[in-house]
Image (tube, rainbow, N blue to C red):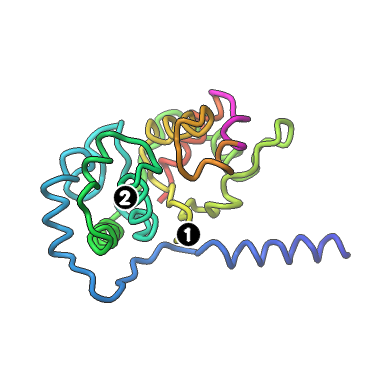
Amino acid sequence: MMRTWKKTALGVMLGLLVPAAAHAVDPPNVDLTRAEEISAGRCSLCHGPEGDSASALYPRLAGQHHQYIAKQLADFQSGRRKSDTMGSMAADLKPEEMLALGVFFEKKPTKARDARDADLVAVGRFVFHRGNEFSGVAACSSCHGERGLGTEQLPRLAGQVPKYIEVQLKSFEQRERTNDNAIMHSIASKLTELEVKAVAAYISTLD
């Protein structure tokens, strides 16, 4: 009885941490016109005009939490997250412009990708929701939510470009990703290459 109560309580606490759905919130004094100008001049070439990614190498920004986007831009600007390209793109952005870009992209519509390999996606679904108790891999859903929608602090994964997910997991594993690394390194370092590809494939099918 006590064990059941503890599991229920944990589930409730996790439920409070992870939203049931992503909602675009408009902070005060956000200049979306300016954000659209910046996006057209800098972001759209790689990330697409609607934030849907113009290449398998670049992340989908549509639907991503505006707080997370603003933080990543600030990290690129400060050098905390290393990238020559993004460092130069963010170099002269003001904090309010970073926030505006975040809101601009969070408002863009999202969509799931079709599953190209049902068996691979099935493996990814298992790891995403249950982890791997034999190797100590935690379930992705324990932080990013059952639908991969994330939180204000943790990124939305649902619908993300599979190749980008693979690259980021490997970067975390090799400590090449220089921000947000502490927890993700401990997880990514235990994933097999099959699990990396499977989780990335499954994530891309979520919406």
Q: Quadrant of the N terminus?
A: bottom right
How many labels sit on residues? 2
Q: Nearer the viewer, residue 86 or 3?
A: 86
Q: Residue at x 31, y 72 (%)?
A: 27
The percent position of residue 139, horizontal first and vertical second, equals: 62, 44
Q: Residue at x 26, y 56 (%)?
A: 105
The percent position of residue 6, horizontal first and vertical second, equals: 79, 63
In the image, residue 4 sits, relative to residue 46, either above or below, namely: below
Q: Nearer the viewer, residue 2 or 81?
A: 81
- Segment tinted magenta in the rendering: 186-193
Residue 46 position by quadrant: top left
The percent position of residue 203, horizontal first and vertical second, equals: 46, 41
Q: Which residue is mark 2?
A: 73
Can you tell which of label 2 and label 1 is closer to the viewer?
A: 2
Q: Nearer the viewer, residue 102 or 63?
A: 102
Question: Three-letter amino acid code at disc 2?
Answer: Leu
